[in-house]
Amino acid sequence: MNQEKILQSLIADNLVSASDSARGRLLREAARLFREKGYERTTVRDLAAAVGIQSGSLFHHFRTKEEILKAVMVETIRLNTAVMQAAMSKATSNREKLRALISAELESINGQTGEAMAVLVFEWRSLSEASRAEVLKLRDIYEALWLDVLRGLKEEGALKADPFVVRRMLTGALSWTVTWYRPDRGGLTQDGLTDQVVAMLGLS
Amino acid sequence: MNQEKILQSLIADNLVSASDSARGRLLREAARLFREKGYERTTVRDLAAAVGIQSGSLFHHFRTKEEILKAVMVETIRLNTAVMQAAMSKATSNREKLRALISAELESINGQTGEAMAVLVFEWRSLSEASRAEVLKLRDIYEALWLDVLRGLKEEGALKADPFVVRRMLTGALSWTVTWYRPDRGGLTQDGLTDQVVAMLGLS
DNA sequence: GACGATACCAAGCAAGCGCTTGGTTTGTAA
DNA sequence: TTACAAACCAAGCGCTTGCTTGGTATCGTC
């Protein structure tokens, strides 16, 4: 199951919006703007202009501005969880699985969903309490994938530090790549970066 | 030279504000509020109320709201750079120096200056272009300290991955601790956390 | 070709924002 | 005691914000 097929099935189940639908286009532009200027500095007029409608018309699709932010986050987690599960299913050993996880997360952060992932990291505080709880539930599923593999590596003796701590360190380290890593601008490929991370953990 | 003495000398040189001065108190409250609610969601009325003055009176001390944000960041970097240089000067080997750096950065992120450090990470986009350049200059000095040590370790063969990449990974990993690590809430001490990071790098 | 839903527009409201203004109090030093 | 600057207050201006409202195209369906 490749990434395109995963996306199709999620769209069919109405779990994420097709990128050629009105909703999908809005969410993509919203992710871009939230990433670029921050949620608070992005006005509903900015959002509307980005998809070529009047600001009031936004509220036909979403009840509030915050609902747009939540949708960006929710759909991104759903997509990346599915992609990650698929990436892992091909691997056999825990070492391979970890590499698949790191590679997939780097891809989600620096690839197509990069803008939305950055929003997920930096705009957390702009979510209401209720939305936060909703997003957290989805994130827990995602995190469980990581912890299973890291615990396995710990038991094998390949990992010295605590799995929980390692995952949180990796979350920070990988998220942070969004602030400096430019896959296009030569030098380091995404695979090369994955190698570096694995090397840093002493697992290469 | 302990942390208190460093602070005194910086205050004497007018590089950071004394925490019992009007300016110092405002900056401390600002860091707290910016951290808690974000810069954009914090109003000048919030800031004024936090130090017990009228909102208009703020502008006697700072020309704009953004200048407050900049001051929080600038003073924090100045302080932490000085603390870090002191921490490193005691160490002899590069291994020890790296441990000192990690420990000091964890302290700055999770100790007294924690709120300001979080602001530095999460409110970057709220700075104007001009302020950003100013803060960046200071950060470069700070980063040079790290890169020197990491390059040394690489030459010794103790480090496998690229020093530049490792530093950026560590920046993310250590910054991220602010979102989950609670030194008070039992379990892991700050020294213990430092051990975990060193172990993760395979340098213990 | 009538109908109802969906998608949108044009206009603007109420609230909150950063910041200004003119004037008063407080602290300090000769 | 006087003089003066620094620190602050009370009031509010001009603008932007998220969102609402009442009405109009557009489109698939029978």
Image (cartoon, coloured by chain):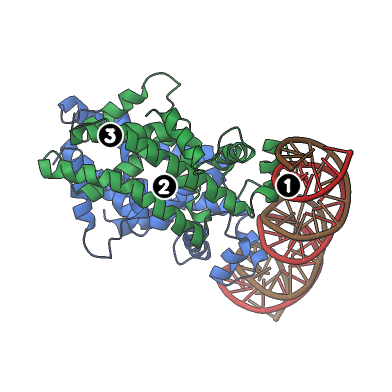
Chain colours: A blue, B green, C brown, D red
Same chain for marks 2 and 1? Answer: no
Q: Residue shown at 67%/37% (left/top)?
A: B50
- Considering every residue shown, the one lying at the far top of the view is B186
Which mark lies nearer to you, 3 or 1?
A: 3
Of helix, strand and loop, which one carries label 1? helix
Residue indicated by mark 2? A77
Disc 1 target residue:
B57
Q: Which label's residue is closer to the chain start, 3 or 1?
A: 1
Q: Is residue D6 left or right of residue D21?
A: left
Tell me if residue A99 can be seen.
no
Q: Quadrant of residue B187?
A: top left
State yes or no: discs 3 and 2 in contact (Cβ < 8 Å). no
Which of these two is toward me, A169 or B52?
B52
Callout 3: SS: helix
Residue shown at the point (34%, 43%) measured from the top left: B171
Choose between A153 and A9: the one closer to the eye: A153
Mark sitting on residue B95: none
| Chain identifier of the residue bearing label 1 in the image | B
Residue A41 or residue A22, whichever sits in front: A41
Q: CA distance from mark 3 to mark 1?
A: 43 Å
Graded by Cα atoms within 10 Å as few (under 14), some (14 to 19) or many (20 or more), the crowding at tag 2 reads many
- Residue type highlighted by circle 1: Ser
- Which residue in the structure is indicated by mark 3? B89
Left or right, C21 with reference to B100: right
Q: Which one is closest to the eye, mark 2 or mark 1?
A: 1
What is the C-alpha distance between the residues marked 2 and 1? 45 Å
